Amino acid sequence: MTQPTALDVALAYHRAWTGHDFEAAMQYVADDIVCLAPAGSIEGAEAFRGFMEPFSKILLDSLVVAAYGDESTALLMYETRTVPVADAPAAEMLTVEDGRITQLRIIFDRLPFTEARAANAS
Amino acid sequence: MTQPTALDVALAYHRAWTGHDFEAAMQYVADDIVCLAPAGSIEGAEAFRGFMEPFSKILLDSLVVAAYGDESTALLMYETRTVPVADAPAAEMLTVEDGRITQLRIIFDRLPFTEARAANAS
């Protein structure tokens, strides 16, 4: 069996979580994943799930606008439409070992989410 | 002369602006550039300069962590260290035509910059 490339794994993970199948998404996540997120570092699969699964629940849909990779690394940029924020693009750099994501660095703009929460609370 | 790839142009642009040579950076920018930034769309080279040059002035240094591309498109992720925010990573998708950037989509987290401004004002 051919080993999937880092990009295959990154796109399969993206399809799963944006398709609201977080169980399937977690199959691509290494137990010892390290996620570098805007608010800081998140370590381990359960903590990672606690970060990403709530986001997947407010997601309406997502479109990948660019996706590249090599043997060990993939780089994605995608749009998301979410319940609180209509246009929330993100970029991810994923390191993949043995078919699982061991590091995921995610960049997105937290400001509109913070503003949406503040507007909701007022 | 071989036409530079989109990635060549993207990296040359990145080296120039992060090296505080904004004149050199502007040589890679098309007159009719469209920049999709977190706060909205910026059209034309002068407006683009008004957006990016002030950021280049608060930049201390930058490190490219991933860079890919094909004929027309490049995708970069990089770290920046800036005066107000110590760790401000960004991702850019650049469309290049005839050696110049015609579209630049940039993603970064505005929240720490907003917080730094608020802390400065108080």
Image: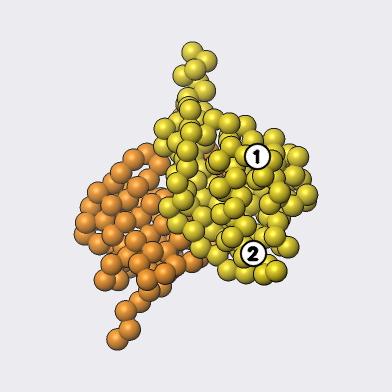
Chain colours: A orange, B yellow
In what element is the residue under mark 1? helix
Q: Residue at x 62, y 62 (%)?
A: B6
In terms of image quadrants, where is residue B57? top right
The vertical placement of B92 against A26, above or below, is above
Q: Residue at x 38, y 60 (%)?
A: A94
**In the image, what residue type sits under mark 1?**
Phe
Residue at the top extreme? Answer: B122
Indicate the chain on which mark 2 is placed.
B
**Image coords of residue B58 (percent x, y):** 54, 30
Whether labels 1 and 2 belong to a single chain: the reply is: yes
Residue B22: numbered disc:
1
Crowding at dot 1, Cα within 10 Å, few <14 / some 14-19 / many 20+, comes out as some
Image point (58%, 37%), residue name: B20
Say which element carries label 2.
loop
Instruction: Identify which residue, B17 or A114, lies in the foreground.
Output: B17
Q: Answer yes or no: is residue B110 visible.
A: yes
Q: Chain of mark 1?
A: B
Q: Quadrant of the N terminus of chain B?
A: bottom right
- Total numbered labels: 2
Residue identifier under label 2: B4
| Tag 1 and tag 2, C-beta contact below 8 Å | no
Q: Residue furthest bottom?
A: A1
